[in-house]
C-alpha cells in the first residue's frame, strides 16, 4: 500500500468590506502613505466594523466560501481547526461555534494559537490527522480580527494589521502530492518584543491596565523585523537543503505577509525570481493567521498540480517555520 500524504484540495476566503486605506490612517495618526508603503508595502487593509461580530464571523464566511465553491457536504467534515490569535472569547472555542454554524455537525473541533505561525502549525497538525489514515476531511481555517486588539492611536502597530480569513480542506492523496516536509520552531524569549500583555491569566485586565491601553498589541518592530528576516530565511534554506531542492525546483514562495521587506529578504536569500513570490500585503496588511490561505486564494487560478510550494512564517512568541507542499489540483 502506498503512503498516505495530506493534500490541500480546496480553498476559500473572506475579508470584510470596509477598506482602511493609508490615506484614512493619515487622518488618525502621525503617518503618511509614503512611509507606510516604503517601509511595509501595505496600501490598505480590511476591518470588520460591525458590532457583535468576532473572528468566528470571518471564519464561518471563509469556510462557507470553500464549501460553496467545491460543493462539499459539511456533514462529511470530521475535524475543524481554527488557527487564530484573536479567538471570539476565552474558554468557549471559536472552532466549536464555527463548526456548528457551517453545519459540520459530525466534526470535532479546536482552536490553535501560535501568533502569526498559527496557520502554518495548523497545516502540520491537519496533515498529521490525515496521514494517520483515521481522518479523510480536515478543514483548517486561519482567521483573525486583529482590529479587536489594535490601538488605533499607536502608529507603530495600527498601520500594519488587518482582519480576514482563509480556509483550506486537507484530504488524503495517493500520488505523493500534498505536505512533503516541515521544519517548525519557537523561542519564548521573543515574547517581550511582541505581545498583548493584559487580559490573559498572567495579567488579568484591571481598571489601570485598561486606562493605559495594555490590552492592545505592543510591538518592538525593529527587533521583530531583524529576527523575522534571519529566521524565516534560515528555515526556508533548511527545507530546501533537506529535500535537495534548488531555486529552479520552487514554483512558489508563500510567505507570511507581515512586511514586504521581510518577504523580499527571504526571496533574495534563496535567490528566486520575483514572479515566483506570492504577494498581496498591499491589499490586506498583516492578517496574522489568514495571510497564507488568503495568498492561496488569490493565486489559486495560477496553481498547477505538482507545483512545489514553500511556505514560511515568522511571528509572536517567537514562532516560525517552513513547510514544503506539492499542490494537488488544477482549478
Ligand atoms: O507578523 C508578526 C510579526 N511582525 C512583524 O514581522 C513586523 C516586523 N517589523 C516591521 O515590519 C517594521 O519594524 C515596522 C514596519 C513595524 C517598522 O518599520 P522600521 O523600518 O523598523 O521602523 P522603525 O520602527 O525603526 O522606525 C523608524 C522611524 C522612527 O523614527 P525615528 O526614531 O527614526 O525618528 C519611528 O518613530 O519611523 C518612525 N515611525 C513612523 N513614521 C511614520 C514608526 N512608525 C511610523 C509610522 N509612520 N507609522
Image (spheres, grey):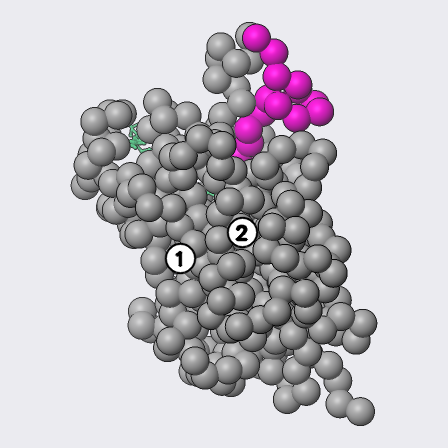
Q: Is the C-beta of the residue carrying label 1 under 8 Å from the nearest atom of ligand 1?
A: no
Span of residues in magenta:
194-207
Q: Residue at x 66, y 59 (%)?
A: 104
List x then y, in percent, for residue 260: 34, 53
Q: Which of 29/260 is in front?
A: 29
Q: Which of 101/265 is in front?
A: 101
Q: Which of 293/18 is in front?
A: 18
List x then y, in percent, for residue 35: 23, 39
Label 2 and label 1: CA atoms lie apart by 29 Å
Locate residue 170: give its quadrant: bottom right
The chief SS type of the magenta part is loop
Farthest residue in the top direction? 208
List x then y, in percent, for residue 7: 61, 75
Label placed on residue 60: 2
Q: Residue at x 43, y 54 (%)?
A: 14
Can you tell which of label 2 and label 1 is closer to the viewer? 2
Q: Is residue 79 visible?
A: yes
Label placed on residue 263: 1
Locate residue 179: give its quadrant: bottom right
Q: Residue at x 41, y 25 (%)?
A: 151
Q: Is residue 270 visible?
A: no
Amino acid at each position: 500500500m502506498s503512503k498516505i500524504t495530506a493534500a490541500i484540495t480546496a480553498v476559500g476566503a473572506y475579508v470584510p468590506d470596509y477598506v482602511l486605506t493609508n490615506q484614512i490612517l493619515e487622518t488618525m495618526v502621525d503617518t503618511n502613505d509614503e512611509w507606510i508603503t516604503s517601509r511595509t508595502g501595505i496600501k490598505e487593509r480590511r476591518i470588520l466594523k460591525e458590532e457583535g461580530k468576532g473572528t468566528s464571523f470571518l471564519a464561518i464566511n471563509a469556510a462557507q466560501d470553500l464549501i460553496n465553491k467545491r460543493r462539499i457536504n459539511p456533514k462529511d467534515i470530521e475535524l475543524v481547526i481554527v488557527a487564530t490569535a484573536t479567538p471570539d472569547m476565552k474558554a468557549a472555542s471559536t472552532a466549536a461555534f464555527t463548526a456548528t454554524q457551517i453545519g459540520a455537525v459530525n466534526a470535532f473541533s479546536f482552536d490553535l494559537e501560535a501568533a502569526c505561525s498559527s496557520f502554518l502549525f495548523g497545516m502540520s497538525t491537519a496533515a498529521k490527522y490525515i496521514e494517520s489514515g483515521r481522518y479523510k476531511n480536515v478543514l483548517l481555517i486561519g482567521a483573525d480580527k486583529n482590529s479587536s486588539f489594535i490601538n488605533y492611536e499607536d502608529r507603530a502597530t495600527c498601520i500594519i494589521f488587518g482582519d480576514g480569513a482563509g480556509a483550506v480542506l486537507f484530504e488524503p492523496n495517493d500520488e505523493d502530492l500534498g505536505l512533503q516536509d516541515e521544519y517548525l520552531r519557537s523561542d519564548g524569549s521573543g515574547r517581550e518584543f511582541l505581545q498583548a500583555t493584559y487580559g490573559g491569566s498572567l495579567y488579568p485586565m484591571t481598571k489601570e491596565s485598561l486606562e493605559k491601553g495594555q490590552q492592545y498589541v505592543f510591538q518592538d518592530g525593529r527587533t521583530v523585523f531583524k529576527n523575522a528576516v534571519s529566521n524565516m530565511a534560515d528555515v526556508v534554506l533548511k527545507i530546501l537543503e533537506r529535500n535537495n531542492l534548488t531555486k529552479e525546483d520552487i514554483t512558489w514562495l508563500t510567505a507570511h505577509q507581515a512586511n514586504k521587506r521581510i518577504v523580499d529578504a527571504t526571496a533574495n536569500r534563496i535567490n528566486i525570481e520575483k514572479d515566483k513570490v506570492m504577494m498581496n500585503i498591499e491589499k490586506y496588511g498583516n492578517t496574522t493567521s489568514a495571510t497564507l490561505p488568503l495568498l492561496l486564494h488569490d493565486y489559486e487560478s495560477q496553481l498547477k498540480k505538482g507545483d512545489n510550494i514553500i511556505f514560511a512564517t515568522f511571528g509572536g512568541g517567537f514562532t516560525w517555520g517552513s513547510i514544503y507542499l506539492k499542490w494537488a489540483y488544477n482549478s
